[in-house]
Structure formats: structure tokens, C-alpha cells
Image (spheres, rainbow, N blue to C red):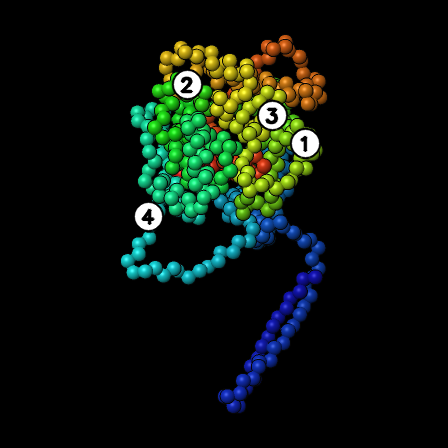
């Protein structure tokens, strides 16, 4: 029922001004009618928008059924005369209640000046990013750095406060002595270090390559891979699992889930959020139904370590994600290594696209790896290929799918959290250090 409630108050006359008399309060209630339709919203109700039209007599008419096509309509539906309806140009990006937590202005000491804030941080970010003072190098830069920035040294000295941090520093130094070029995932798979401390430690020992065959990799100070032909084994390969009906299986049939989904972002504009659905290689070998059976907690010595599958490719095993960044030396398949070392001893020029390898080496590697993965999926899910035409053995060639935008390299294999502000791996990692 729809009720109309009126509250009336009348103050009594006061004879003595010191006496406080409560006013008389009366409530009047009237039943106006019965509510036959009730609307319920997942979000805040005042953020819902209804398409209404005001007639000459002031009567509101709903245009919902006239503008929304619920079934295939004939031509008459599109030729009907309708009142002019223009939706609002913009809506609020929030549809859930948010506490603003108003606080008084901070009182600073005399002489304090607010820091300079660039225009990029005025909208969208709650604070300016903390710089980690990494040195970025492009492929066409003539010189490479031989030592870290002074600010990077000071940053590491501040956080290196216990013997464990000193031990991690020595372990990373040894890794760069054995191999001068590392990806961040490869480092995280070989030493156990908190991700926040690794962000400070890497700029202390290495510089970051932005472009070229060693892009998105960390290179030891003083080492220039462009001058050493043997550095071709450290080049990066951007590999993406191919899926589509022309390959015999669609994206929904893939046993390897995507890194991120539009339904998995933790944003205030979404009412319902789904949990992470990353699948590890171990789960794939055991079957998708057994995922989550191994939930034992990692010991402290390997708490932050990733599995080797995040940077090593082996024959007969599926990658943990649909897009992977492999260094050529981490492709542990004999046929792939033969492709890499076809021009050993005859390297003459280091190019930005192929490095010290022969032209189209990356394309040949991707084709071979895609064929291996297709054979794995064929053996584990033969029903997907039952209706496809068979081709000659060993001659299945898959079209090369190229792409230069790279996904985030920070995610761990067991728990993945989308990066804040970018889907591009290189851009995200750069923003972490500038």
C-alpha cells in the first residue's frame, strides 16, 4: 500500500521562559492506493534511466517498447513515427554506493609546497606512481649503461634491511653472471623474493630493453647484446596459442584459459564479479576437473617462486597462458633449437626484428610450436577434430598471427591480478619503474 503520512507539531504557550515544554506532535495517515508493480535493482535505483515522453497534457508515456527491439521486426517497425528521444550524453561510471570519507585539510609546516603533479595523474589515479629509477634502453641507442642511477642505489639500500634481502641480492648477481639477460618471470622462478622488493632490486643490477629482439628483458649493466652474436639465445619470442575454427577448435574449447577477462576486473562499476580462472599446467595434465586439489601452502623459502612453466617451453606440455614470452634458450625442444642455431658462426648483422637470427626465424618457431600444441589438444580432446579434414602428417602449416601489444608479465601462475591501468606488458612494467 502507498501511504501518505503527515506530521504536524504545535508549540504550547510558555508562561515561564525557563521551562521547556515539548511541542505537541500529531501524525495523520491516509491510504492513497495499492502498488501493483514493484521494481528492484541490483545497483542504486536512482541511477536507472527510463525512456519517457511527455505529452501535451503533461502525461508521461513509456517509450521502452517502441525503441527496444526484442524480436525480428518487419519494415513497418522502423518506419513508425516516434517522438524525438535523445538519451543523456553521459552517465555516471559508478552505480554502487561509495563512501567518500571526507577529511579536513592537512596542516603542513610553514614553507611547505605541494609537489608538482603531471597532468597524467590528475584523473584516474589516486596517487602518483612511486619511481623505482630504472634505466630504459632502445634498440637504436648507441650507448648502454654501465652502472645504476644513484637513486636506484639509494632505494635498494633503504629496503635491504635484513640478511634475507642481502642473500637475494647475491643470488640475483649470480644469475646475471651465469646469464646476462633475464625476463622478470624467469627471475621470479629461480629466486624467492617479494614482488615489491624485486621492483627495487632489478634497477640496481640491470637495465631494461624497450625495443628490439630483447624487448621487455633485463640486461646486466655493461653488457650489450647487440655486439655479441652469442646473445641471440637470449632473444624474446612473443608466442600466442592460435585458436579458431580454421585450426579445429574455438576459443571456448581451449584447455588453456586467457590471462584476463573483462568480467574479472575489480572495478566499482561492476555489481557481480567472477573469481579468477587461471589454470596451471599441473591441473591441465591431471584434467580440468581436478583443479584446485593441490592447495598446500608453500614453504617460506619458495613462497614467491613461480613454476618453471612460466618461462620454459617443453614438448608435450601446454603453456599456462595463451600468450607467453619465451627467451630462445628456454625453448627446450631439439627441433626448435635447430631452427635457432641454423646460422651459428655466420651471424653478420643484428637487426631490430630478428636480432642475430635468420630472417623469419620467429615465424618458423611459432609455426612449429603451434603444431606441437595442436597435436597435444588433438590427443587430449579428439572429439574436437572428429569433423575436421585430415591433412598430411608433418605438413600442417598454420597461418602466422602477428601482434605487437604485449600482456602483463607480472602475473604469477597460481594467482593472477590484472594490472592497474594497462593491458600492455611493456607499458605496465615501464610505468612501475619511471
The residue nearer to you, when weighing 267 against 127, is 127
- Name the mark on residue 378: none
Give yes or no for contact between labels 3 and 2 (Cβ–Cβ under 8 Å). Answer: no
What is the CA distance from the residue labelled 4 to the residue labelled 2? 45 Å
Q: Mark 1 or 2, which is nearer the eye?
A: 2
What is the CA distance from the residue labelled 1 to the residue labelled 2? 41 Å
Q: How many residues crowd mark 2 within 10 Å: few (<14), some (14–19), many (20+)?
A: few
Residue 161 percent across, percent down from the top left: 42, 46
Q: Earlier in the sequence, mark 3 or mark 4?
A: 4
- Residue at screen point 29% across, 60% down: 110
Q: Earlier in the sequence, mark 1 or mark 2?
A: 2
Q: How many residues crowd mark 3 within 10 Å: few (<14), some (14–19), many (20+)?
A: many
Quarter-of-image position of residue 398: top right
Write down the residue under mark 4. 116
- Residue at screen point 38% across, 37% down: 204
Q: Mark 3 or 2, which is nearer the eye?
A: 2
Write down the residue under mark 2. 230
Q: Earlier in the sequence, mark 3 or mark 2?
A: 2
Label 1 sits on a secondary structure element that is: helix
What is the CA distance from the residue labelled 3 to the residue labelled 4? 48 Å
Write down the residue under mark 1. 288
> On the rendered image, what quadrant is the N terminus found in?
bottom right
- Name the mark on residue 318: 3
Q: Mark 4 or 2, which is nearer the eye?
A: 2
Residue 223 percent across, percent down from the top left: 36, 26
Q: Earlier in the sequence, mark 4 or mark 2?
A: 4
Q: Earlier in the sequence, mark 3 or mark 1?
A: 1
Q: How many residues crowd mark 1 within 10 Å: few (<14), some (14–19), many (20+)?
A: some
The residue nearer to you, when weighing 99 against 212, is 212
Q: Earlier in the sequence, mark 4 or mark 1?
A: 4
The residue nearer to you, when weighing 154 against 385, is 154
- Residue at screen point 63% across, 27% down: 254
Amino acid at each position: 500500500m502507498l501511504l501518505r503520512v503527515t506530521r504536524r507539531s504545535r508549540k504550547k504557550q510558555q508562561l515561564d521562559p525557563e521551562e521547556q515544554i515539548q511541542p505537541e506532535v500529531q501524525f495523520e495517515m491516509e491510504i492513497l492506493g495499492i502498488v501493483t508493480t514493484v521494481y528492484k535493482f541490483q545497483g542504486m535505483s536512482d541511477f536507472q534511466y527510463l525512456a519517457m515522453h511527455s505529452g501535451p497534457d503533461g502525461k508521461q508515456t513509456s517509450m521502452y517498447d517502441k525503441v527496444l527491439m526484442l524480436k525480428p521486426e518487419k519494415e513497418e517497425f522502423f518506419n513508425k513515427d516516434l517522438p524525438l528521444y535523445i538519451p543523456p550524453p553521459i552517465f555516471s561510471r559508478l552505480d554502487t554506493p561509495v563512501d567518500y570519507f571526507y577529511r579536513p585539510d592537512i596542516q603542513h609546516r610553514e614553507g611547505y609546497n605541494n609537489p608538482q603533479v603531471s597532468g597524467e595523474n590528475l584523473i584516474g589515479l589516486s596517487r602518483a606512481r612511486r619511481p623505482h629509477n630504472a634505466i630504459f634502453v632502445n634498440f637504436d641507442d648507441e650507448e648502454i649503461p654501465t652502472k645504476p642511477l644513484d637513486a636506484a642505489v639509494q632505494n635498494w639500500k633503504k629496503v635491504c634491511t635484513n640478511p634475507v634481502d642481502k642473500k637475494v641480492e647475491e643470488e640475483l648477481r649470480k644469475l646475471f653472471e651465469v646469464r646476462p639477460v633475464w625476463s622478470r618471470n624467469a627471475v621470479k622462478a629461480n629466486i624467492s623474493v617479494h614482488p615489491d622488493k624485486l621492483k627495487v632490486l632489478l634497477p640496481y643490477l640491470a637495465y631494461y630493453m624497450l625495443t628490439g629482439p630483447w624487448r621487455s628483458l633485463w640486461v646486466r649493466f655493461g653488457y650489450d647484446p647487440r655486439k655479441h652474436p652469442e646473445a641471440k639465445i637470449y632473444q624474446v619470442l612473443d608466442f600466442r596459442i592460435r585458436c579458431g575454427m580454421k585450426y579445429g577448435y574455438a576459443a571456448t574449447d581451449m584447455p588453456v584459459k586467457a590471462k584476463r577477462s573483462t568480467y574479472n576486473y575489480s572495478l566499482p562499476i561492476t555489481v557481480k564479479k567472477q573469481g579468477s580462472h587461471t589454470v596451471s599446467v599441473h591441473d591441465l595434465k591431471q584434467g580440468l576437473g581436478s583443479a584446485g586439489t593441490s592447495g598446500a601452502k608453500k614453504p617460506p623459502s619458495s613462497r614467491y617462486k613461480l613454476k618453471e612453466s612460466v618461462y620454459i617451453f617443453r614438448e608435450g606440455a601446454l603453456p599456462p597462458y595463451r600468450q607467453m614470452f619465451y627467451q630462445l634458450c628456454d625453448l627446450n625442444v631439439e627441433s626448435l633449437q635447430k631452427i635457432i642455431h641454423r646460422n651459428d658462426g655466420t651471424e653478420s648483422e643484428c637487426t631490430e626484428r630478428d636480432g642475430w637470427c635468420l630472417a623469419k626465424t620467429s615465424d618458423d618457431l611459432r609455426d612449429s610450436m603451434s603444431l606441437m600444441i595442436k597435436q597435444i589438444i588433438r590427443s587430449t580432446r579428439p572429439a574436437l577434430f572428429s569433423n575436421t579434414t585430415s591433412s598430411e602428417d608433418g605438413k600442417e602449416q598454420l597461418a602466422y598471427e602477428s601482434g605487437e601489444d604485449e600482456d602483463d608479465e607480472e602475473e604469477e601462475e597460481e594467482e593472477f591480478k590484472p594490472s592497474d591501468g594497462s593491458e600492455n606488458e611493456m607499458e605496465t612494467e615501464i610505468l612501475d619503474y619511471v
